Image: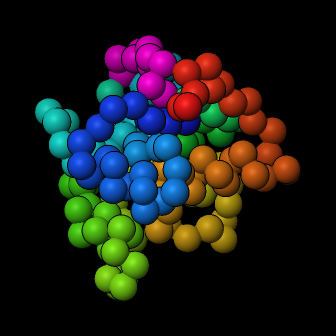
Amino acid sequence: MKLVFYWGPGDLVTKVIRMLTRGPYSHVELQFTDGTRFFSSGHGLLQGSHMVRDHRVYDHWWDTVFLRSTVKQEAAAERFAFLLVGFPFDWKGLISFLVPYFKRNRRGKYCSSLVLEILQKSLHLYPGCRMKLSPNGLYRLFIEDPTREVTVDVSGAPP
């Protein structure tokens, strides 16, 4: 199981996300070892949260964090992710994240908040972490946590 973080070219929204979250990443997906991936997107053909089994091979615009998990833990994560399929992309949640003074009282449904929710509810990772988290914040959680054993592949790392 792995997390993949996008740092490649993007539109104005992508650039604003990166600037406000102080990092190179604008999107995150969760890919299971069976080739199924979970993601939430606000544009393109597949808007909202989806699971697709396409055995996608990510190009050099993506950095990878490999997660250690048992077969049972990964199956639990995949089952929980399936429950989140169909949620529309949360533009209001994304805007409330980007504009610090915009308050909201519900959990967000954008890529990094949904991936964090899957990791919290199924693998019991980062239980105290808030759901209002960017792809950059999620990446930093794994890189800066000395108690987690992760393997990071940044072969196409941003300059």
In this image, 136 relative to 151: left or right? left
Query: Which residue is at the far left?
Result: 45
In this image, 121 relative to 89: left or right? right
In this image, 88 relative to 123: left or right? left
Provide residue 99's location: percent of width, then percent of height: 34, 75
Provide residue 145's location: percent of width, then percent of height: 78, 52
Quadrant of the rendering where the C terminus is positioned: top right
Query: Which residue is at the far right?
Result: 147
Q: For residue 79, say whether it is visible.
A: no
| In the foreground, 153 or 7 | 7
Provide residue 128's location: percent of width, then percent of height: 66, 71
Image vertical order of residue 32 relative to residue 60, above or below: below
Provide residue 102's location: percent of width, then percent of height: 32, 82
The image quadrant that residue 73 belongs to is top right
Image vertical order of residue 99 relative to residue 41, above or below: below
The image quadrant that residue 70 belongs to is top right
Main secondary structure along the magenta-highlighted residues? loop
* Total count of labels: 0
54 in magenta = yes
**Residue at the (18%, 43%) spot, across then down:** 43
Q: How is the image coloured?
A: rainbow
**Residue at the (37%, 55%) spot, across then down:** 17
In this image, 68 relative to 37: left or right? right
Q: Which residues are magenta?
A: 53-62
**Residue at the (68%, 60%) spot, across then down:** 126
Q: For residue 96, say whether it is visible.
A: yes
Quadrant of the rendering where the N terminus is positioned: top right
Query: Which residue is at the far front?
Result: 159
**Residue at the (47%, 43%) spot, across then down:** 25
47 in magenta = no
Image vertical order of residue 157 relative to residue 85, above or below: above
